[in-house]
Image (cartoon, rainbow, N blue to C red):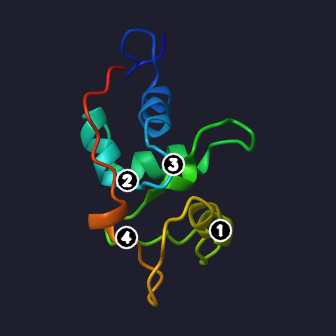
Amino acid sequence: MKPGDIDGMSLYEEIYEVVRSIPCGKVATYGQIAAIIGRCSSRQVGYAMASVSAGSGIPWHRVINSRGKISVRSYGEPSFSQKELLESENVVFDENDRVDLSIYGWEPTEIEL
């Protein structure tokens, strides 16, 4: 077990488990995921989402920033594939490329890790 592991589950595994709970057509914020985990920052959630490999089944695209926007990537642009994936789940962006969190924001119920 690595430092920071709880019950054999690494921090990233905990983050991924919570992200898997976000239903299709809903989004969560990095800070929201961090608050659920309770032992990480929103930045760490962002790092975890950036390290998700294609085909993993983790719906990384459902995690956005607290302003309702897709975060800028390391190359300075937002992920257009993330927007396309969200739109394919009927998540609507306004003219400023924001998601209305009061409509599409995920309201988690009890999550067991």
With respect to residue 32, does 83 lie above or below?
A: below
**Residue type at numbered disc 4:** Gly
Q: Which residue in the structure is indicated by mark 2? A: 30
**Residue type at numbered disc 2:** Tyr
Q: Tell me whether circle 4 and circle 3 mark residues in contact (CB < 8 Å).
A: no
Q: Mark 3 Cα within 10 Å, few/some/many (few <14, many 20+)? A: some
* Pointer 4 or 3: first along the chain: 3
Q: Which residue in the structure is indicated by mark 3? A: 24
Q: Which residue in the structure is indicated by mark 4? A: 68
In x, y percent, where is residue 10?
46, 22
* Pointer 4 or 1: first along the chain: 4
35 sits left or right of 64 in the view: left
Q: Nearer the viewer, mark 3 or mark 1?
A: 3
In x, y percent, where is residue 102?
26, 66
* Pointer 4 or 2: first along the chain: 2
Q: Nearer the viewer, mark 4 or mark 1?
A: 1
